[in-house]
Amino acid sequence: MFELSISNSSMAGLKRVLSGIDSRLTKQLDNALMRSVRLIKKNIAEEAPEGSGRLKNKIMRLPINGEKSVISVLARNSRKIVVEIDLSRKTDSLIRWVNYGTGLFGPYGQMIRPTRSKFMRFEINGDVIFARETKGQRPQHFIENGVNRSRLAVISIIKSALK
């Protein structure tokens, strides 16, 4: 969960927080928040490490602010908007692994060992590698970088909707 400090609230609590305001302004804020979430998603994809392009494609296909949303904007109070990114689905594992790391660098802090054979087999730059264990991949924190890169733009989008 990542917080963006701004002067108003967000999609989920918008109607509650701004109950006395006309529906035109509410729609403007809804649109501004959706634009903000799309911008955050785009910036996260741009911060993702280069490779085959699979990771960026997965990020760009993440649903936002809907029934099956992964990226959503929630109201905490009148001074903060929280960007919630839910990567608990099985299909989001690649995004989790690259962002948070694996093996010694990941949440479990253990070497990666094969479960069904004596060796793991993988390719690095066209060379086939066999290993009994590996340290894993260091975290790359591209999600945090993308959210942080979006801060000022999101604030200006929300402020312009309030004018």
Image (tube, helix red, strand yellow):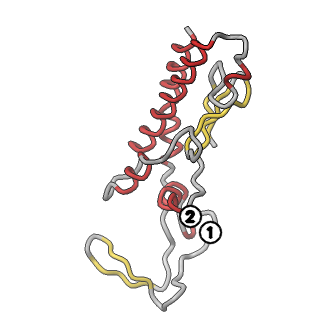
Three-letter amino acid code of the residue under disc 2: Phe
Q: Tell me: residue 66, above or below residue 94.
A: above
Q: Name the foreground residue: 76 vs 67.
A: 67
Say which quadrant the C terminus sits in.
top right
Q: Which residue is mark 2?
A: 105
Q: Tell me: residue 124, above or below residue 129.
A: above
Q: Quadrant of residue 89?
A: bottom right
Q: Secondary structure at mark 1?
A: loop
Q: Would residue 130 be found to the left or right of residue 112 on screen? A: left
Residue at left offset 55%, top offset 70%: 103
Three-letter amino acid code of the residue under disc 1: Gly
Residue at left offset 51%, top offset 34%: 37
Q: Name the foreground residue: 86 vs 112.
A: 86
Give coordinates of residue 72: x percent, y percent: 59, 38
Q: Name the foreground residue: 130 vs 80.
A: 80
Residue at left offset 63%, top offset 63%: 107
Q: Secondary structure at mark 2?
A: helix
Say which quadrant the N terminus sits in.
top right
Q: Quadrant of residue 14?
A: top right
Q: Which residue is mark 1?
A: 109
Crowding near pointer 1: few (<14 within 10 Å), some, many (20+)? few
